[in-house]
Amino acid sequence: IQAILRGIRDSMRTAGPLDRAYRTMASTLAMVIVVGDRAFVVHLGDARVYGQRQDGFLELLTRDHAVMQQLIDSGVPYETAKNHPSSSVVFKGLSANEDDGDEKIDISDGLLLIPLKDYKRFVVVSDGVHGEFADVTKDHYVMRSMNDVLRNDAISPEQAAEQYILRARRI
């Protein structure tokens, strides 16, 4: 996993000399790596990974590395946190900044090992999608309107992605 993350970071750093605007580039990241009967879920920032449980509903597996999440965790109501002036500030991600060195990328609070038997599918989304579809329940976010798409087991991942994008653009 570290080799994959360093490769992404190195690609970002390579772009810096090509264009001054890229020198301070940073990115959020979410990915699922399946190995045998388990999945490694890795994320940095506010890109998210959801697991479609066996009952068909999506469960948020990751926790945003963002001010909004910190506010919610400290007891601030969702609507108040969402409208906070710093709610969109992300405090963890991949950086092209050379000052960050070449040491290991800290994913200690963004790495999960999950048995595949617990989930039918995984959904990886950027904040541009989950920000449009997120709905708050008691303890976690559920993408309710997205559940309809995934409940159809005959739909391919490509068709599901197309439907997500279409729905996000309509909102």
Image (cartoon, rainbow, N blue to C red):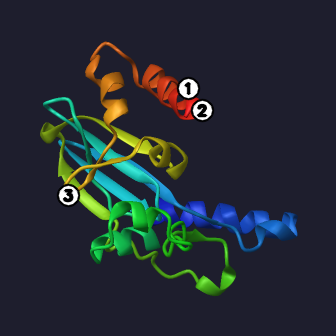
First in sequence: mark 2 vs mark 3 = 3
Residue toward you, 92 or 76: 76
Tag 2 and tag 1, C-beta contact below 8 Å: yes
Query: Can residue 6 be seen in this snapshot?
Result: yes
In this view, the residue in front, 124 or 164, is 164
Q: Residue at x 29, y 16 (%)?
A: 152
15 to 128, vertically: above or below:
below
Determine crowd level at label 2: few under 14, some 14-19, many 20+ residues with C-alpha closer than 10 A: few
Which amino acid type corresponds to the residue marked 1 in the rendered image? Leu
- Observer-nearest residue: 159 or 39? 159
Residue marked by disc 3: 139
State the image coordinates of residue 122 (x, y, percent, origin top left): 32, 39
- Density class for disc 1 (Cα within 10 Å; few <14, some 14-19, many ≥20) is few
Q: Would residue 66 be visible to someone looking at this image? A: no
Q: Are marks 2 and 3 in contact (CB under 8 Å)?
A: no
| Position of residue 88 measured from the top left corner of the image (x, y, whole percent) | 54, 66
Picture layout, residue 62 above or below residue 21: above
The C terminus - image quarter? top right
Q: Residues within 10 Å of mark 3 (few under 14, many from 20)?
A: few
Q: Which mark is residue 166?
A: 1
Q: Amino acid at mark 3?
A: Asp
Cα separation, mark 2 vs mark 3, equals 27 Å
Residue 159 in percent (x, y) is at 46, 19
Res 14 quadrant in image: bottom right
Q: Does label 3 or label 1 sit earlier along the sequence?
A: 3
Image quadrant holding the N terminus, namely: bottom left
| Residue most extreme to the top | 154
- Residue underneath mark 2: 169
- Identify the residue shown where x is 26% and y is 22%: 151
- Helix, strand or loop at label 2? It is helix
Q: Disc 2 and disc 1: Cα gap in Å?
A: 5 Å
